[in-house]
Amino acid sequence: MPPSTAAGPVLRGSNLTIDSIIAPTNASSRRTKIMCTMGPACWEVPQLEQLIEAGMSVARFDFSHGDHDGHLACLNRLREAARNKKKDIAVMLDTKGPEIVTGLLSSETISLRKGATLILTSDYSHEGDSQKLAVNYPSLASVSDGQTILIDDGKLELTVLSVGEGEVSCRIETNAEIGAKSTVHFPGMPVDVPTLTEKDIDDIQNWGCKHGVDFIAASLIRKASDISTVRTALSTHPKTKIISKIENLEALQNYQSILSATDGVMICRSSLGMEIPPEKVFLAQKKLIREANIAGKPIVCAAQMLESMLVNPRPTRAECSDVANAVMDGADCVMLSGETARGEHPVGCVRFMSRTVCEAEASLNYKSLFQAVRNSTLKEFGKLSISESIASSSVKTAIDIKAKAIIVCSESGSTARQIAKFRPGMPIIVLTTQETTARQCNGMLRGVQTKIVDNIHDLDTRVSDTVEAFKAEGVAKNGDPIVVVHGASPVAGATNTMKIEYA
């Protein structure tokens, strides 16, 4: 939102100077979280410690690859690294989901030429060639004449000419060379696939729940009832948060109901780019982030953010701009995929992302941002909930008195999430006895840091210890105000008090 004066809105960027552009980046001020995908390029303890030092707050385990034993070995090393660095690093299990792919081929790859005809068949036993390809989608014949089909992330574009019994005749629109198991997309067409496959359920229950993951990233969520299906699979571990991956047009159309049901959102921009025109993905990103901000749900911006650093030691200018725009749009977390899992510069990626994030955050006017979130919430819902009102008042007070930090006592993380929603320009420190809450808040909530305490019954002592730590770290000096938010009793959902302490 552009800043305003008494005369009205002015162009954004009035706080930028040449000195601020050339000055070294202070990465210690970063608020936006960074998610890193685990893989052979980064999964040893020393490498994981470097990722944590560079800024990783969430470790993503991609269950499209690997097995339970391999992922567990990596998880154990991650937790060792987190203990060594004394950081609350969250763990996310990203489900493989119900993928639609091509079948095996008669050769390693096949070449397809523009203008030729290609048959797609739902007979998955067929070995594909340049005349016919198998697709693991029983409802393949539900497509219509003229429908576009994209294969291998859009490298191969087809147009449906006719539909027969279990087969579809297509015209090839682009020259392409593809291999087996290439992804298949039907832009704009709802697909008839389950929310969770048998593999997904096994991964969630026999790995995720068993080993205490903090988040499940649920693939191909298309409607609110899909989230209920995932919660059923998580019934023995209700504290695990569900992050709904928005990947297709159906999910975009049902976004409001999905947002109401989910704990958080991930924008899968590469998949969205197969479903809607790529030149419109940035619009979808802005809309999805805005509505998640209003709802107070954390949102992750994912896919190809620093893709060139799979090989190159430095990102492109466009990639840095992409990361910065996600932050300025309001993303709580930005994600690295192959860059950290199999790239040549995993630690360098996180460092570049962290510095870029900090520069984007430094350009924001937090007083205006607070007011924009509050006004947008009131416009959307007509009022604030009680917890939102307490959070809004706390952030407004912190802004007015120029508080150095906001201390939140939170057992479930709900109060911390509401405070983070209103985007204060100072650090939010969450005191909690719950390790899961600490990891979830530190992992995904913008601007939040965490501290695990033995108990919060003796609240004054815990707050005093935290204030003394601020002074020792240079966050605050004697006499500086600090806002404290807590409840009359140390139980989840009891937050009702805001007070001001002085360092």
Image (cartoon, helix red, strand yellow):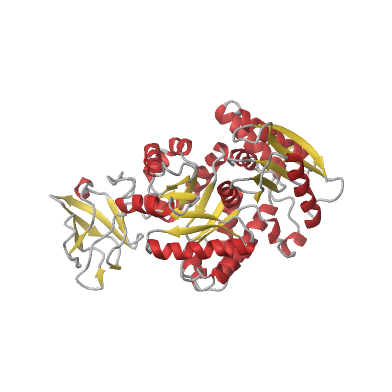
Across and down, in percent, residue 389 comes to 65, 30
Q: Residue furthest right?
A: 478
- Seen from the viewer's position, the closer of residues 398 and 39 is 39
- Seen from the viewer's position, the closer of residues 109 and 296 is 296
The correct choice, above or below, for 497 with respect to 69 in the image is: above
Residue occupying the point 25% across, 60% down: 102
How many numbered marks appear?
0
The correct choice, above or below, for 199 with respect to 463 in the image is: below
Residue occupying the point 71% across, 32% down: 497
The correct choice, above or below, for 172 with respect to 259 in the image is: below
Residue 342 visible to an observer of this rendering: yes
Q: Where on the picture, by quarter, is residue 417?
A: top right
- Seen from the viewer's position, the closer of residues 379 and 410 is 410
Across and down, in percent, residue 256 comes to 46, 36
Residue occupying the point 57% across, 69% down: 347
Residue 316 visible to an observer of this rendering: no
Q: Locate the N terminus by quadrant.
A: top right
User: Image check: 259 left or right of 487?
Assistant: left
Q: Residue furthest left?
A: 165
User: Image check: 328 left or right of 193?
Assistant: right
- Seen from the viewer's position, the closer of residues 478 and 36 is 478
Across and down, in percent, residue 16 comes to 73, 55
Across and down, in percent, residue 137 comes to 23, 52
